[in-house]
Image (cartoon, rainbow, N blue to C red):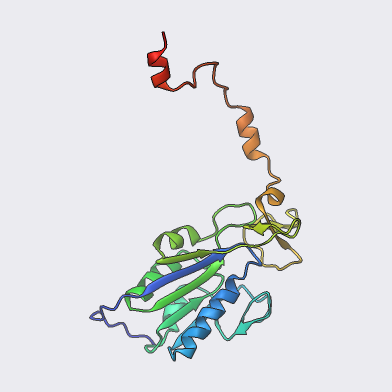
Amino acid sequence: MVGYNMGHLASGIVEVVCGPMFSGKTEELIRRVRRAQIARQKVQIFKPAIDDRYHESDVVSHSSLSITALPVASSLDILSNLFDSTRVVAIDEVQFFDQNIIPVIKKLARRGIRVICAGLDQDYKGSSFGPLPELLCMADRVDKIQAICTVCGAPASKTYRKNTEECAEQVLVGESDRYEARCRVHWDDHAEDEDLLAFSIPLKSGTNKDPKEVATSP
């Protein structure tokens, strides 16, 4: 297993592929992993044990591409299962990991490892998901990709949960039986923001003029 060399000054890189469900995040992760394997780089792939939708251990995309991975229960399990020879670490469904995933990824990058992460940046409510906000800030490269809206066919950046009465929790593992990709128009059926606007005080006539215009007015 891993033995950290504090004298090793090589700098790693952190890449994040994010977007809604059905956008091809896992497919892109697999594509990058396979290119690294072609380059004969030692790669290890990890996934959260909670995600067993398609396969207990493999990382599988919605388009049925798959690659062997190691399911782990916590972020620290990634370090305890890492080999000295590993040069690329891929982490799928990174939003399901605990907050320790951030220092884990930082440690990997300091060791000179290329870290490729894929995950949802937003939950079904449009709120940030798990450790993604901090991960996006620290990443060296971020690719936010879109799906196709199931209603109108436009580019989709949101994940829509079909039945919110089933479970209101942020984490509810599921597939097309529970989720759809939606554009903003066909996803945003929540009126909270509109309700807030109803309480705003309209500007009085003339108060929104440019100060320069007011100063030069006779």
Farthest-out residue, left = 7
Farthest-out residue, top = 218
* 9 to 40, vertically: above or below: above
Residue drawn at x 72%, y 50% is 186
Asked whether, in this view, residue 148 is left or right of residue 100, the answer is right
Residue 58 can be seen in this image:
no
Q: Nearer the viewer, residue 67 or 81?
A: 67
* x then y, percent, for residue 13: 38, 73
Residue 185 can be seen in this image:
yes
* x then y, percent, for residue 163: 76, 56
Among the 4 quarters of the image, the one containing residue 171: bottom right
Quadrant of image for the C terminus: top left
Among the 4 quarters of the image, the one containing residue 58: bottom right
* x then y, percent, for residue 157: 62, 57
Residue drawn at x 57%, y 64% is 145
Q: Nearer the viewer, residue 170 or 13?
A: 13
* x then y, percent, for residue 113: 38, 79
Residue drawn at x 71%, y 59% is 149
